[in-house]
Amino acid sequence: MRLVGVRCDVGPQRGIGHVMRCLALAEELQLRGLAVEFICDAHTVPWAAAQIAARGITVRAAVWTPEEHVEVLSRYDAVVFDSYDLDPAVYPAVRRTGVPTLAIVDGDLRGAEADVLVDQNLAAELDHPVLPPDTVRLAGLEYVLIRNEIRALRPVDPPTARQVAVPRVFAFFGGTDAFAAGPAVTRALVATGLPFDATVVAPTPELAAAVAAVSSQVRVVGPTDQLAAAVREADLVISASGTSTWELLCLGATAGLVCVVDNQVMGYERAIATGTAAGVGVLSELRADPTAAAAVLKRLLTDATERARLAAAGWQLVDGQGRVRVADALLYLIS
């Protein structure tokens, strides 16, 4: 059986976005009869470790130097990289061993070098980075990596308007909410003065207490395996403008995005510009002034037609088949 190694970032501050999109690709590879192993510090985020284990995937400890990568990764038939933190020297060192490589990037290559580069972001196909020699680039939402959980609940038809007296809001900010967006967004919702029925995901007891301190009417839950179902049930989903954005669009959600960190700026601006999501704001600004998002949130909470328009526009952009196309490219390298 052919074996693929996945070297990805994960951690309390880095979050779990890299792991989750790699799991989507791993699911597709497993369907095609390949075995997958992860090389990462999954133990630092127990929920992420549980997600990997649930798919029968072995985890090896993360390595960092080029020499360590050459030693560890030479046993695989192909290697997938998804990292912001690796020494750029790792990539050419591994390529020189002859092991086929695929790297997932977000705009800035950060020194990544591979046989196949995947940039699954909106309008990435319009960018023209300088590529390493002998590299194929797969770019745009056509290549978004979507997990089984999301694919299974993708609506067959585009969403239509749902008229409700009290809209249901679901808010989550990755597996760790490393920048404490949950409490800030809860304050922004309360500042609208409008009725809503909200559930906020808080990955730690400290974050749960902070959300509850803002409003005792908000339900607070921990990281959930039922994320897609919660998204489908909500009238409005508020999330960070990271990799989860594309999952929301695939599910036909009305997405309100918060730009949590600088590396999300491009995706945030492009999603808003194309009319596939609403911009709730930049996290630092919401912290300083909870009313900064009042106009956007009031529109999303009261206008069912606008919610449906956003949801339908996003649904049309992400078909859930991106991982099939990426797996095809990887398997071509090792066929």
Image (cartoon, grey):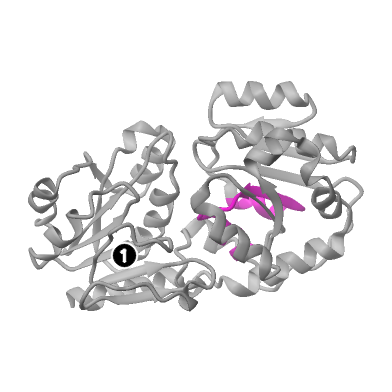
Q: Mark 1 points at which residue?
A: 29
Q: Residues within 10 Å of mark 1 (few under 14, many from 20)?
A: many
Q: Position of residue 134 (x, y in %)?
A: 21, 78
Q: Where is residue 332 in the image (x, y as percent from the top left)?
A: 24, 78
- Residue 332 drawn above or below residue 7: below
What x and y, as percent, mark residue 283?
64, 41
> Is residue 65 one of those drawn in magenta?
no
**Residue type at the position of mark 1:** Leu
Front residue (pair 19, 274):
274
- Picture layout, residue 215 above or below residue 233: above
Residue 277 is at least partly visible in this image: yes
Is residue 241 in the magenta section?
yes
Name the foreground residue: 31 vs 271: 271
Residue 165 located left or right of residue 1 = right
SS state under label 1: helix
Quarter holding the C terminus is: bottom left
Q: What residue appears at the point 75 percent right and 36 percent down from the top-left corner?
A: 289
Q: Position of residue 110 (x, y in %)?
A: 33, 57
Instruction: Give the mark count.
Output: 1
Q: Quadrant of the N terminus?
A: bottom left
Q: Which residue is drawn at 38% across and 49% down?
A: 19
| 94 lies left or right of 161 | left
The residue at the far right in this view is: 165
Q: What residue is at 49 percent from the left and 52 percent from the top?
A: 263
Residue 21, placed above or below residue 209: below
> Where is residue 14, by image quadrant?
top left
The residue positioned 32% from the left and 33% from the top of the image is 43
Task: Give the magenta part as a residue range.
Answer: 228-251
Residue 247 seen by the camera: no
